[in-house]
Image: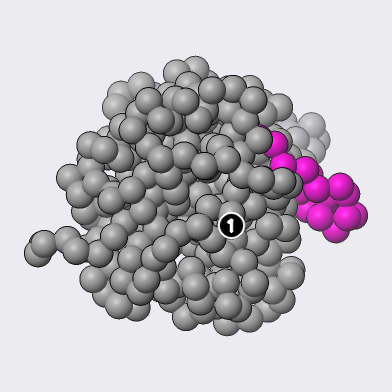
Amino acid sequence: MGKHTRRVVAVIPAHNEQATVGHTVTSLQHQTIPPDRVLVVSDNSTDHTVQAAKDAGADTMVTVGNTHKKAGALNQALATLNLTAGDLVLIMDADTIMVPGWIERALVELQDPRVGAVGAVFQADSDRGWLRGCQAREWHRYGVQIARTGKTFVLSGTAALIRWEALQDVRRATGNYYDPSALTEDFAATINLLNSGWLLRSPVECETTTETMGTVPELITQRTRWSRGALQCVTRQGLTRVTRVYWWQQLVLLVAILAGVAAYALTMAGWALYGPRAAWYAALILMIFWLERVVTVWDMGWWHRAVAALMVPELVYAWILQVAHLKAVWQHFTNAAETWHLNDKETSHAIFG
């Protein structure tokens, strides 16, 4: 690559992130092409987030009267930036660590003038235990899917490098850089960028490490919001050229859940009436499913291969995710009160993995 001349400003919204924000800033300083400025935006923090960010070498600001969580914090911060066409903004979570070549690899994608943003492919910060291990395998498989298809369905909220012109296009079209009413601001940003005519990329080399949920209730809360946020965005937009793929994904996901429930019910009923039996074609389908589960985590090591081969641990995990999705569908269509949990991640890509 030639000499890098355009400005890259990293904006990191943070709420009570004193324990992690310093590591996030440090990972930016260790980039092969570091950002020209790092701005940590403390949003209603009650701890020492600001001081931790300053100690790590970042500029800081504090939001004023923000009631719109991460999107509101980003809107306030972006409004203060004095950027021009050609400049880039790196939006990053305060508990995320980048691989050293992240920005350099993203800049390669942005050499295409049609590409408006480059998002992260993220991995789990921990794979210890059944629940975190399942999340780690889920996210790894999503990375495998991206590597295979080259498609970017959602611009990850963990890290995204966005053209200033693209953000300006979104602001002119919607009135905000980020939708303050969206439950999943990253999904809404994805739709808005696509509506503005920009292409999106997520090369697997743009890897980040981010936090997983430690308990089942936390996971259900997180995934319910992710699913509901996606439903919120697509129903608001209606069926368009941009949203039709997301409508299709929602339909396929719901049909898959209902088909799975029906299959379990029919299997149990058949066993009760005729005793355990297995048709050859059922065994073949099961074998294909088993191979897919193992092969897609092969490079994670022998432990993950073994757990995937057992199948039952991941089936239980899948049922939990299905419960969360059905809960989101129910809440969305019954207009239940919307909530946003501060310990919850913004990224909603996994519901499409």
Provide the residue designation for mark 1.
75
Q: Can I make out residue 314 in this image?
A: yes
Front residue of 258 and 152: 152
**311 is higher (above) or lower (below) than 78:** above
- Left or right side of 173 for 36: left
- Left or right side of 256 for 6: left
Confirm whether the magenta stretch covers residue 334: yes
Q: Where, by quadrant of the figure, is residue 109 drawn? A: bottom left
Q: Can I make out residue 250 in this image?
A: no
Q: Where, by quadrant of the figure, is residue 320 drawn? A: top right
Q: Three-letter amino acid code at disc 1? A: Asn
Quarter of the rendering occupied by the N terminus? bottom left
Measuring from the top left, give residue 264's x and y in whole percent: 71, 40
Measuring from the top left, give residue 164's x and y in whole percent: 41, 68
Q: Residue at x 58, y 28 (%)?
A: 16
Measuring from the top left, give residue 308's x and y in whole percent: 44, 31
Front residue of 287 and 232: 232
Q: Which residue is drawn at 45% across and 18% down?
A: 128
The residue segment tinted magenta is 327-342
> At numbered mark 1, what does the secondary structure look like: helix, strand or loop?
helix
